[in-house]
Amino acid sequence: METRHTNNLYYSSLLCFLVALLPVSSCSGSNSIGVRCIESERKQVVNFKEGLIDRFGSLSSWVGLDCCKWQGVSCDNQTGHVSVLDLEKGTLKPCLLHLKYLTYLNLAQNSFLETQIPKFLGMLNNLRYLNLHGSGFSGEIPPHLGSFNFGLRAQSLVWLSGLASLESLDLATVNLRGVGGSWSKAVNMLPSLASLYLYHCGLTSLDLTLSSLEVLNLFGNSIKSPIPHCLEILYLGGNKLDGILPESLGAIKNLQEVDLNINFFWASIGNLSSLWLLELSYNKLNGTIPNSFGKLVELSTLDLVGNYMEGVLTETHLANLTRLDSFRLTTYRNRSLVFNVNQDWVPPFRLTTLVLINCLVGPSFPLWLQVQTRLSYVIVSSAGISDTIEEEWFARLFSNAWTVDLSNNSIIAKLPPKLYSEVLDEVDLSRNRFEGPIPLWLTNATHVYLQRNSFSGSVPDNIGELMPQLQTLFISRNQISGRLPSSICKMEGLKFLYASNNSLSGEIPSSLTSSCQLVILMLGDNSLRGNIPFPLNSCRQVQQLYVLQLRSNLLEGNIPEQFCHLSNIHSLDLSNNNIVGSIPKCFHNFTALKYGNATLDYEFFFELQDRIIGEQTMVVETKGMELEFSRTFLEVKNIDLSRNNLTGEFPKELCNLAFLDTLNFSRNRLSGNIPDNIDDLRLLEFLDLSFNNFSGPIPPSLSSLTLLNHLKLSYNNLSGRILTGNQLQTLNDSSNYEGNPFLCGVPLSATCPGDAISPPTPSSGDGDSRDKLWHYLSIAVGFIAGFWGVCGTLVLKESWRHAYFRYVDELKEKMLLWIALAAARSRRMFAKAKENN
């Protein structure tokens, strides 16, 4: 982490303070039984409090005679001496020197403005834990401590050498850049130090000789120097290392945990026989996985996510990993990493966590995966599995797991019709070949993705009671029919409902749009009927809707006036229905499209985007063909009211939606002029007003839309000259303007009044005739040469002639045989069908 600005310090300090006090509170609680702090130490703590900035009253408990009960203070159970001081915002005073029994001191996330470097800290001989994470000192620096530039620098760490009992030192995010090895000299004089945290300290080298050091965190530096041999836990992530892992790592025989994520090297680690955790994620590793992995017999956690590995993974890599509990391996689609193990191989491990993405595990469902009965977190996505999986395996898996992702395979299966699970939270079975009804699952699941399968039947009537905690339900592109049950409205936390491209019928439950949490509602490409429901209640639910897609249904009636309250709407698609009436002028209240200030949970939206790329589409008709463009939720900023029976004018107020990129009013009965202020839609890329009754000239302001790349004004009653300036010069296809009898100018053939008629191109007379003659003669000569080149050879060369006719006879016999077999097969199928009936 970077050092925070002073005006934000107290917010972060309070958070760290509360977290750090969790263990302290329990200690303090034990001290309250028959133990009171020593009066002299209580006075020193009170004196120390006077220099603290306590904006939120966190130290309001510092009253009374027993300081051992105060928040942030803990005392020894036997002697009553103050042993722990956990304070993350204050001004150090030399009075701390009198707390000579102090063993725990947390001063993380402090700035200590206008304060001298606390050299007296080096006299706390009993101190075992010191946390200066994110601290910086300023003000007057004692001459013997050297120069001072920014933050807590190495020269100010000389006093550390006096902390002979120190076991844990946290200097994370302290600026140690460009100070040489002076800081390490001070650290090397701490004989008991076992844990050292130096992440994001700007280090480029490391000169540690501590034999007692067991835990070393160097995350976010640029270390390339040798590593101490005594370590048991090593964190080197984010160091941007390249080449080969330093040989010194292989010599660390006692190493148990290695975290090397976000680096750029491949490591040979077969000598680390004590290793139980190996974190190599996001290292851009390529090539094959070495067989030396099979020597890590103590390995429990292996993380190889986000690399470029290829080749083959065999039983040699896995057969000795008897303790393996968590296995995470992902590569990219343009790479090929294949699991090549015997179909009946049973591994020695039983995993609780399994992540395999873009690795070829299939096509069959391997036995080594079937026997994993302890899985609680499983992602096997894009693994090439195209086998049939028994229903019992899913019943066992769903009863134990809290996350199941088998997406992007071709799995053929039916899900258990009923299931009860207290732990199941997230299920993603999208893009497979699951069939049968949507099961009756009694769970507290929050996210369910079942899109792009072959589920059939209706949505369970009591789905709201079965899964009341559901936030995300994706069942699009299946074969689901029937009504959308009203119980779905009982999911009070429902945010995302995506049921497009099914055969849903009936009316949309009126209470559905009363959900105060609904963010995305997509019910397009079904057979839903009735008016568009939009009841209002006391909550501000209409301000939450971000995407509303009801296209290609049988909806009718007017657009509800309540739509004007959709202040957060980003995409509105009501196309291809039977909607009548006019376009509400108050659409200009769509403030997210007006000012670009939609309120979103972007982290979750990006997760959705990864799961449903290509799900949201926009259909464009051009030159008699319908083209479908894929759009993700975060990309769509559109209003599509096309293919309805809307009347009235194009409301000029809509031109205030400056962040709109797609506007489609085509195939309605709109009339009037195109608004002159249409250039206010400055980010517009797509505009389709075709097949309406618009009249008048094309407004000159249209040429100011510099991002416009698709324009359709065809089949209206527009008149005057077609504009040619700026971006419109690139939109010069005549189909964009055809069907307007009063339009003239390029690219149409109709000329405008006053345009000069271009004289015909003068003919060259005899020259043209001669060119045509030579053209026809060359065709005739080419035909004759080609014909006699083949047929003449057959006439003159007897062996070729016999071979040709033999080939024709054989081809005829094969065709007759194929026809006879096909006819016989058809007769057998017909007879069998007749018997079955």
Image: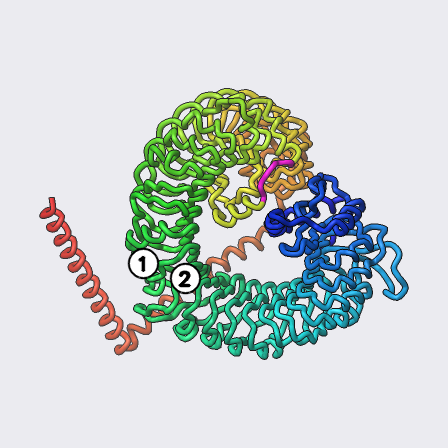
Residue 769's place in the image compared with 555, above or below, is below
Question: Which secondary structure lies at badge 1?
Answer: loop
Seen at 42% across and 57% down, the residue is 380
Q: Residues within 10 Å of mark 1 (few under 14, many from 20)?
A: some
Residue 158's place in the image compared with 108, above or below, is below
Task: Give me the C-alpha separation between circle 2 and circle 1.
Answer: 22 Å
Task: Give yes or no for residue 600 being in the magenta stretch.
Answer: yes
The location of residue 77, given as percent across then percent down, is 62, 54
First reached walking from the N terminus: tag 2 or tag 1: 2
Quarter of image, res 658: top right
Residue under circle 2?
351
- The residue under label 1 is which amino acid type? Asp
- Residue that lies at the very extreme toward the right in this rendered image: 143
Q: Decide which of 400, 223 is in the foreground and name it.
A: 400
Q: Decide which of 334, 267 is in the foreground and name it.
A: 267
- The residue under label 2 is which amino acid type? Leu
Q: Decide which of 576, 632 is in the foreground and name it.
A: 632
- In the displayed structure image, the side of residue 547 where residue 240 appears, left or right: right
Residue 737 in sight here: no
Residue under circle 1?
387
Foreground mark, 2 or 1, reads: 2
- Range of the magenta residues? 597-602
